[in-house]
Amino acid sequence: MIAIILGTRPEIIKMSPLIRACESMGLDYFVIHTGQHYSFDMDKIFFGELQLPLPKFNLDIGSGTHGVQTGKIMMGSEAILSSEKPDVVLVQGDTNTVLAGSLAAAKLSIPVGHVEAGLRSFDKNMPEELNRIVADHVSDFLYAPTNGAKENLLREGIGREKIIVTGNTIVDAIYQNSKIARLKSNILERLNLRSKDYFLVTLHRQENVDDRSRLKEILKGLELIRKCLSKPVIFPIHPRTRKMLDNFELCANGIEIIDPVGFLDFLQMESNARIVLTDSGGVQEETCILGTPCVTLRETTERPETLEVSSNILAGIQSQAILDATKSQMDNTGLWKNPFGEGKAGKHIIDHISREFSLAKG
């Protein structure tokens, strides 16, 4: 039996190809939803949109400090894993859910598979960097999305026999859902947007939104883009970011702030944007796959492949640098080669797990 632990919407997206592979192969599996970012009631719609079965277990942890959140997830996961006794636990990425889920499984001597292993920003001020390092070092199977990620793991002394290069499951998710998005989403019409005639923004990382001076400087950069490049700047705002804007009494003049949108709507917005500005690692990947130029509002990235193929540029958070980076991406044609695989990572991972544990069909 396979246990899949997830807790954020990006994890649901990136684990969806594994869930679909388990379903299509008839394997016995279950999903634990920790509720790290949202309550399960809010995420029910998301599972429905992606046409996924609902999780068997819901912890409803909610927000909190890193220690509180991680501890609660460990406690809840441990109880379920002790009762269900799966053959293997799969986690994905770099969240507190990944840290807690992998530790809970490892302490119970249940093998752990880390999907998207080996990513490194080399910036330990990022909580996500610490999470991914710990998860990698307690995991038994490290599913690296690229050869670069594999090399990071080897440099840290992880055994070559534990590392499997699979490609990134986000490619699977985008390929599987882009057609559905084109058919079902009318987000451009609803927002009165024209393809390739607007900028899209996402912003949620702690180091950016919890620091008033950094957040203010980023907003100033977005305002300069709106003023100098004369295109709408659309900002589906993360709940954490909205909270901090209110706390800091900041506003974004000329920026069109909207409520968060679902994955299908966001896919349409990403694929039709002229440029996407983000501090999200996942969005750096998605834009690279979709052929949309990206400007990253950080000084480092754990997705160096996007820089190597020139789909992405690091701008930092200074307002003039953000404007200059955006101007430089205006001439980007989007004709790079996707470095994240052919879109079969989910099947590769589940095939490997099935062979390792001789899993029977459910």
Image (cartoon, helix red, strand yellow):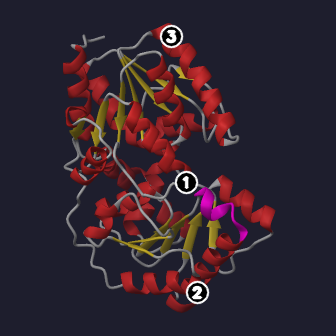
Marks 2/1: CA–CA distance? 25 Å
Which label lies toward us, 2 or 3? 3
Residue 225, which numbered label?
none
Q: Say which amino acid is labelled 1.
A: Val
Residue picked out by circle 2: 224
Residue at horizontal 50 percent and vertical 69 percent from the top: 200
Q: Label 3, secondary structure: give it.
A: helix
Marks 2/3: CA–CA distance? 54 Å
- x, y percent for residue 124: 51, 54
> Callout 2: few (<14), some (14-19), or many (20+) C-alpha neighbours within 10 Å?
some
Residue picked out by circle 1: 261
Q: Earlier in the sequence, mark 2 or mark 3?
A: 3
Residue picked out by circle 3: 82
Q: Is residue 161 visible?
A: yes
Q: Looking at the image, is 288 positioned above or below residue 6? A: below
Is 221 left or right of 98, judged from the image as shown? right
Of residues 80 and 290, the one drawn nearer to the viewer in this rendering: 80
- x, y percent for residue 3: 41, 21
Q: Label 1, secondary structure: give it.
A: loop
Q: Label 2, secondary structure: give it.
A: helix
Residues in magenta, as a range: 205-212
Quarter of the image with the C terminus is top left
- x, y percent for residue 93: 43, 43
Quarter residue 176 falls in: top left
Task: Examine the structure image and report whether residue 210 is included in the region drawn in magenta.
Answer: yes
